[in-house]
């Protein structure tokens, strides 16, 4: 049968995988950065320029104007979600007729590619949320510490797939989030060193019943294969109350990644303790070739195979332009 005829009935509908299409079937509402900024209302700016400069990552140009345009409205939105969650908690206690004193923390997941600005977004949000009038306790944890140690990755032949879903101790991630949601005291999260490019053995950060936890990592919205027998398989995102995806075009992320690598070659990589110290001793052209290879063979593959496909699962998407600043905000419809 002619393939055109076979598909003719489907062409009347948008690609079901294109959740960001401008069609009426999209689950998102789109806002320009200027329109989004209007939702700030009377939310106060509680950060100074020096604080923003301290919070932003390498090559991220975020400043107070960007905080005003994007992050104050986002802070206000999150405040409404946290309040609604706390109200629902009280209503459920009444419904179940239980005297449960422990409120479960509100967990915000932040996903996106390497070099797209997840860390900056997470740190800025943490500071803004901490300064709400209710002064909530806000903690930030990244998934880097849940990577398998380099020795294990080498043994399993996964060093070239570091950052891919299989390179994480998913069971440890799920245990950590489960304990946090259960309101347990002093839950430990492993620490990671970007200097040694490895998990720090025996070193942890202790999270003790925060009001809000920000959980940041490239694959936090990743799903897993479903079992054939129908048994429950929890996803990391099952523990999230709100999720954010930091988005940009592939060519832009590529440029940001390579620019960052070449800058680090002139700075952090020059430290003899750095895992990447050897790259600082290469010529400019050789180092650039390494950066391009790491992008094409590892980071781009991970983006296309694992990270980008999770974008439609986010509650909110921040779409960045060539200047590394947010140009558009997509908010999932209720």
Image (cartoon, grey):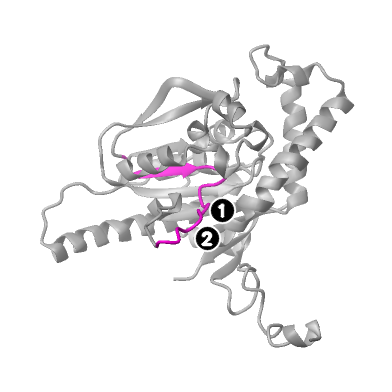
Q: Is residue 142 visible?
A: yes
Q: CA distance from mark 2 to mark 1?
A: 9 Å
Residue at (47, 58) in percent of width and height:
226
Q: Which residue is mark 2?
A: 313
Q: Using a 10 Å C-alpha cutoff, classify the residue at mark 2 as few (fewer than 14 neighbours), some (14 to 19) or many (20 or more).
A: some
Q: Quadrant of residue 213?
A: top left
x then y, percent, for residue 112: 60, 48
Q: Which sits earlier in the primary sequence, circle 2 or circle 1?
A: 1
Q: Quadrant of residue 173?
A: top left
Badge count: 2
Q: Is residue 98 above or below residue 159?
A: below
List the single residue furthest toward the front.
229
Residue at label 1? 245
Q: Nearer the viewer, residue 250 or 156?
A: 156
Please name which of the two marks, 2 or 1, marks the residue nearer to the observer: 2
Residues marked 2 and 1 touching at CB (< 8 Å): yes
Measured as percent of width and height from the top left, residue 28 is found at 55, 69
In this rendering, the answer to whether 3 lies above or below 192 is below
Q: Using the rendered image of the protein, determine whether residue 324 is visible from the camera's viewpoint.
A: no
Q: Is residue 106 magenta?
A: no
Tell me if residue 213 is in the magenta stretch: yes
Question: What percent of the width, then of the height, locates residue 223?
Answer: 51, 54
Quadrant where the image shows the C terminus: bottom left
Across and down, in percent, residue 320 comes to 67, 53
Q: Residue furthest top?
A: 272
Q: Secondary structure at mark 2?
A: helix
- Magenta span: predominant SS is loop
Q: Secondary structure at mark 1?
A: strand
Instruction: Left or right? Give the position of 62 relative to 270.
Output: left
Residue neighbourhood size for the residue with mark 1, other residues' Cα within 10 Å, grouped as few (<14), some (14–19), many (≥20): many
Q: Which residues are magenta?
A: 210-229
């Amino acid at each position: 049968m002619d393939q055109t005829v076979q598909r003719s009935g489907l062409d009347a509908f948008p690609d079901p995988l294109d959740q960001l299409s401008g069609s009426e079937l999209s689950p998102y509402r789109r806002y320009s950065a200027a329109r989004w900024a209007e939702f700030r209302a009377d939310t106060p700016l509680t950060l100074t320029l020096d604080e923003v400069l301290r919070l932003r990552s390498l090559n991220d140009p975020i400043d107070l104007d960007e905080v005003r345009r994007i992050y104050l409205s986002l802070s206000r939105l999150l405040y409404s979600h946290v309040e609604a969650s706390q109200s629902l908690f009280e209503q459920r206690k009444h419904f179940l007729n239980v005297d449960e004193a422990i409120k479960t923390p509100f967990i915000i997941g932040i996903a996106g590619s390497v070099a797209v600005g997840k860390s900056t977004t997470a740190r800025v949000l943490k500071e803004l949320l901490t300064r709400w009038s209710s002064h909530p306790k806000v903690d930030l944890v990244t998934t880097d510490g849940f990577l398998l140690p380099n020795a294990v990755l080498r043994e399993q032949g996964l060093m070239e797939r570091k950052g891919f879903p299989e390179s994480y101790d998913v069971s440890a991630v799920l245990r950590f989030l489960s304990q946090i949601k259960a309101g347990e005291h002093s839950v430990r999260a492993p620490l990671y060193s970007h200097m040694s490019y490895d998990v720090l053995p025996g070193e942890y950060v202790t999270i003790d019943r925060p009001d809000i936890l920000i959980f940041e990592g490239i694959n936090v919205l990743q799903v897993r294969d479903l079992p054939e027998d129908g048994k429950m398989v929890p996803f990391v995102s099952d523990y999230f109350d709100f999720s954010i995806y930091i988005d940009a075009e592939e060519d832009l992320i590529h440029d940001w990644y390579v620019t960052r690598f070449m800058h680090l070659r002139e700075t952090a990589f020059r430290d003899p303790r750095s895992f990447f110290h050897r790259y600082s001793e290469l010529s400019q052209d050789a180092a650039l070739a390494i950066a391009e290879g790491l992008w094409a063979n590892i980071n781009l593959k991970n983006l296309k195979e694992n990270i980008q496909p999770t974008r439609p699962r986010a509650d909110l998407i921040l779409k960045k332009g060539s200047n590394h600043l947010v140009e558009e905000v997509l908010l999932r419809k209720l």
